[in-house]
Image (cartoon, coloured by chain):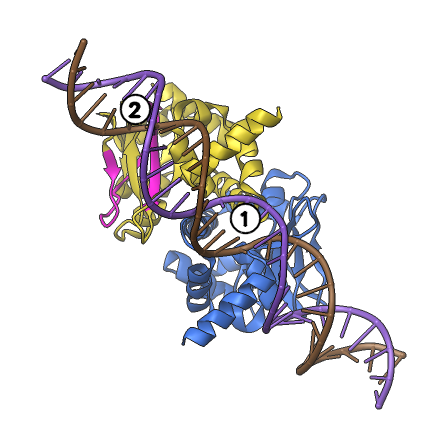
Chain colours: A yellow, B blue, C brown, D purple
Amino acid sequence: MQDLLAKNILRAIGHTLTDEEFALFCRHSFVKSFDRKTLLSQEGEHCKYVYFLVKGSAYSYIVNDHGDKHAIQFALEGYWITDQYSFFSNRPGMYSIETLEPTEALVVNKENFEKICQSSHMFEHFFRILIQNAFVALQYRLARTNSTDAEHRYLEFSQLHPEFVQRIPQYLIATYLGIKPQSLSRIRKELAERK
Amino acid sequence: MQDLLAKNILRAIGHTLTDEEFALFCRHSFVKSFDRKTLLSQEGEHCKYVYFLVKGSAYSYIVNDHGDKHAIQFALEGYWITDQYSFFSNRPGMYSIETLEPTEALVVNKENFEKICQSSHMFEHFFRILIQNAFVALQYRLARTNSTDAEHRYLEFSQLHPEFVQRIPQYLIATYLGIKPQSLSRIRKELAERK
DNA sequence: GCGACTCGTTCACATATGTTAATAAGTGAA
DNA sequence: TTCACTTATTAACATATGTGAACGAGTCGC
């Protein structure tokens, strides 16, 4: 189970955990299971935890003034997810997080997260790299959103994340791409006809 | 001059530098001046440096398939800027960075950046917080881009960054918001008429 | 096996934003 | 001053995407 975590760390920083580091993480986290459609975090409330998914899937979303949900991030096994805004600032969250399938996660609360980072330069480094990579991916996504039409964004998304296309409902992918589910349906139809 | 940097660090992590830490940073950075319209980084080439602006302004942008520039980030005095993708991955850049005014910056190359982070847990921490804050802001910006119309995005932008509206050309702000300069002009006209 | 959902599709029509082109004000260099 | 260049504005028309509504195929609980 913590195998996934070890791999995650290895991939990010190129080396694996010592036994002490591993113990440090275990002491400050716990495992928890969630049903499908469980809210892990809710808009307006403080998001106290960061989740590392071991099994299942979840997504975060924002609700706009018209009440529409817009997906922000998807997470499958091996992904971290939280409301970064709320978690890091200790303010009420702007996003909600919901499981899509029955899900199992390693859970770390804010206090323990800070402790882990303080007592281990390695973990501080790891989490810097982790958020750095997330930043780079997000920046690219925004750049494409601002400079490319929906059809190309969808094509790029489905090539980059075929596993999301498989497991995430299409109407959520649409909002993730910044369009309506009907529009994505139309785009997919055109792509299929042209092919 | 390094005053700005000290403030920047203080604001991010709540305490200031020791003399050794300050010396560490100085040993691994240098000051440089640039004319207006200087390319600090160029698409296709490795972005070797991160810049902390002490004076002037700059912006990063992506060029899409039609050859249109789209602003990614703006930087004024007290802001950090680089092509994070290229800088952190050591790959050819996807963005370019150009000064908008005569500019002065503290410059750190990748190697020294890593050294600073390795030899000081405090700097590792600072840069984690820095990129964390950048991530949170970026995520919110993307969430709004995907869920809000251009008029509201412009209003929010100009309230959040009045200093950008002052100093950054309007056509660049338009591309930053994901619209054409003509559209921003139209939106501004409507806002003015309604008022 | 039945009703209640959820999800994807399709369609006719609406609207925000893009496109192209022209104009004008402002700035800086010669 | 004049010329070249950059930036902002405006207008008529084009197009991608949104809107609202209907329909059908799954799926789940009972």
Q: Secondary structure at mark 2?
A: loop
Image quarter for residue A76? top left
Image quarter for residue A69? top left
What residue do we see at 56% from left, 25% from top?
Answer: A192
Question: Is residue A164 in view?
Answer: yes
Do the residues at discs 1 and 2 belong to one chain? no
Q: Disc 1 sits on a residue from what chain?
A: B
Q: Specify the amino acid type for callout 2.
A: Glu
The quadrant the N terminus of chain B occupies is: bottom right
Residue B21, position as x, y percentages in the image:
49, 56
Q: Which residues are magenta?
A: A39-62
The quadrant the C terminus of chain B occupies is: bottom left
Whether the magenta-drawn stretch holds residue A57 is answered as yes
**Dot 1: within a 10 Å radius of its alpha carbon, few (fewer than 14), some, or many (20 or more) residues?**
many
Q: Nearer the viewer, residue B132 or B96?
A: B96
Residue A50, position as x, y percentages in the image:
31, 37
Whether the magenta-drawn stretch holds residue A60 is answered as yes
- What label does residue A110 carry, if any? none
Label the magenta part by its dominant secondary structure.
strand
Residue B134, position as x, y percentages in the image:
46, 52
Q: Disc 2 sits on a residue from what chain?
A: A
**Dot 2: within a 10 Å radius of its alpha carbon, few (fewer than 14), some, or many (20 or more) residues?**
some
Residue B166, position as x, y percentages in the image:
54, 73
For the residues labelled 1 and 2, the Cα–Cα distance comes to: 43 Å
Q: Which residue is mark 2?
A: A101
Left or right: A33 as drawn, with respect to A114:
left
- What label does residue B116 carry, if any? 1
Q: Secondary structure at mark 1?
A: helix
Q: Specify the amino acid type for callout 1.
A: Ile
Question: Is residue B77 in view?
Answer: no
Left or right: B179 as drawn, with respect to C8:
right
